[in-house]
Image (cartoon, helix red, strand yellow):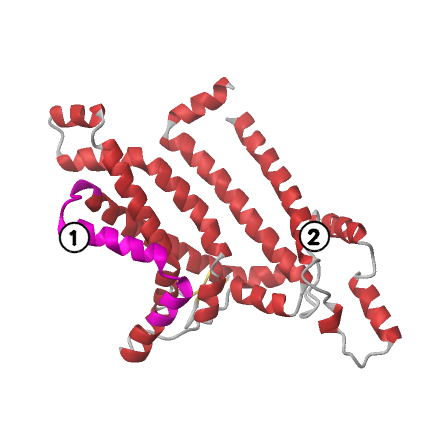
Amino acid sequence: MIVWIFRRLWQACLVMLAMSVIVFIATNVLGNPVDILISPDSTQQDRARIIAQLGLDLPLWRQYFAFLGSALHGNLGTSFVYSQPAIHLIFERMPATLELAICAVLLSVVIGIPLGLFAGLAPESPLAKGTMAFSILGFSLPTFWVGIMFILVFSVELGWLPTGGRGETAALFGIQWSFLTADGLRHLILPALNLSLFNISLVLRLTRAGVAEVLPQEYIKFARAKGLSETRVIFVHVLKNLMIPVVTVVGMEFGSVIAFSVVTESIYSWPGMGKLIIDSINSLDRPVIVAYLMVIVMVFVTTNLVVDFLYTVLDPRIRLNEGEQ
């Protein structure tokens, strides 16, 4: 197990290094921040001084190695616009995005798995067919359109929920969270539901497919022949054996939810990393863009590590296969 962990960590470091090169080069082809940050009325001496101060006068390879050296010490650069460490700006907004993403993933699991189980156990029932039709809508409808419709229906027409913002927050471990207050929860419902809609459909269909695959297996027939209750058969034998693909999808989608929460945060004015990156792209604030993308890469890499570890917990055969290599 120790060798397996070190191997995965080494692979994660290589992925982070490769992505740092790609991210740094990609952000440097977006445009020239000098055109936005420096007034057209500035003199050539002022322009040269500011460019040198920002380090934009160096060749690209020297800028990268300077960035890499600073990154190894936890410094991903200073924002051109805010004149603050970029990583601090990201970490200030990260709790709001993480809260939204975690709620969205929890909704996809809490809603998707029970609906998928029901659709797989009673596939011919009208409710199961309606559930599968709903999943098609979840895949097909664009997030921005659904978000706007939610606001029109639940906020404008019915007046049940607020249109945007984070609402009242409360501190836990020195961090402000919305789910700890009633007003914050009201502000959290619509964006979390909007962000989770695609994943609810994905988990629902995956669970249904897993149930349809597991039910005909011999060990399920044997469990029923032993006289086990249907509840025990479903929750111990069926559900446990279909959890590996569900864990895979939920784990991978957690990173995707964080990365693609930009649209939802923009629609609902949610003060997370997504809104920050949109503002940074508009102002070509390269350090913030690079810091944001590296944090997203780190989330994906960490999620993969956690999913790999959960594999060994859910299926010991995976651990045995690793030991045989």
Callout 1 secondary element: helix
In this image, 297 relative to 21: left or right?
A: left
The range drawn in magenta is 120-149
Q: Which mark is residue 127?
A: 1
Q: Is residue 304 above or below residue 140?
A: above
Identify residue for label 2: 25
Instruction: Tell me, yes or no, whether the highlighted magenta stretch contains residue 138.
Output: yes
Quadrant of residue 162 in the image? Answer: bottom left
- The foreground one among 68 and 43 is 43
Q: Is residue 176 visible?
A: no
Q: Main secondary structure of the magenta part?
A: helix
97 on left or right of 291: left
Task: Tell me which corner region of the image, top left, top right, bottom left or bottom right, holds residue 39.
Answer: bottom right
Q: Residue at x 30, y 36 (%)?
A: 242
- Residue 204 makes an appearance in the image: yes
User: At which x and y percent is residue 171?
Assistant: 46, 64
Magenta-drawn stretch contains 279: no
Residue 91 place in picture, x, y as percent: 57, 59
| Residue kind at label 1, given as amino acid type | Leu
Three-letter code for the amino acid on which mark 2 is drawn: Ile
Residue 215 figure quarter: top left
Q: Name the residue: 14% across, 45% down.
A: 124
